[in-house]
Image (tube, rainbow, N blue to C red):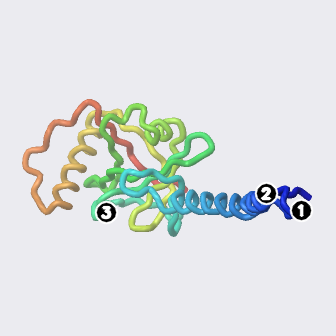
Amino acid sequence: MQTNGYLNQPDSSNNKLSLLLKIGLPALAMLIIGGVSAWAYSCPCERTPGIYLSGERVEQPVTDWSFANQVELCQIQTRSGIISHAINLNCMAGSNGELFLSCAQCDGKRWSTAALLNPEGYVRLDGLVYPVNFAKLEDESELENAWHSRALKLATLRGTTTGEIAERPAHWWSFRVSSRT
């Protein structure tokens, strides 16, 4: 037994350190794990990405995504490597019920790179999670359709009319989203 040199009493600083190691470190580890788990399953939040889209899974294929225009943002989950990546993203349904995702200056963003490498992912709309495939649009007419669908959705959500639709920037990408069964 270690003593502090006075009356052979145990060194209290060693006891405190031992107690800290036995109780404090495991408690801190549990707090960190709990916080990371809560973040991973509750985000994407605003601009903060998440890892996993929780919610009721819908396995039936969707052929008409028009209901997506009533939702301000989609939440998508892509996979690259071991960890998934979930974010909020602009989505819009076209006049034929097709679903598009879009982003400006998309080249090199984590989600778009993952969607190009592995087209399987998920979309969450109003708490429901749909297994989907992502396909980058290359055809000019399809890109214009997605761009006009975006303008119509934004105008509807804002309670305005589209007026003259600006020209689509060259750095703007769009992906077609289709149900995966």
Q: Give the crowd class for mark 3: few <14, some 14-19, many >=20 residues within 10 Å.
A: some
Residue 92 x %, y %? 30, 53
Residue 56 position (above or below residue 79): below
> Three-letter amino acid code at disc 2?
Asn
Do the CB atoms of the residues marked 3 and 2 lie less than 8 Å apart? no
Q: Which of 117 and 42 is in front in this view?
A: 42
Residue beneath the point at 34% across and 53% down:
98
Q: What element carries label 2?
A: helix
Marks 1 and 2, how far apart at CA: 14 Å
Q: Nearer the viewer, residue 163 or 65?
A: 163
In the image, is 80 to the left or to the right of 68? right
Query: Of label 3 and label 2, which has the lower sequence position?
Result: 2
Q: Which of 171 and 146 is in front in this view?
A: 171
Residue 155 x %, y %? 16, 56
Query: Of label 1 and label 3, which has the lower sequence position?
Result: 1
Q: Mark 1 points at which residue?
A: 8
**Number of residue marks:** 3
Q: Mark 3 points at which residue?
A: 71
> Three-letter amino acid code at disc 1?
Asn
Q: What element carries label 1?
A: loop
Q: Name the residue under label 2.
A: 14
> Three-letter amino acid code at disc 3?
Val
Residue 37 x %, y %? 58, 60
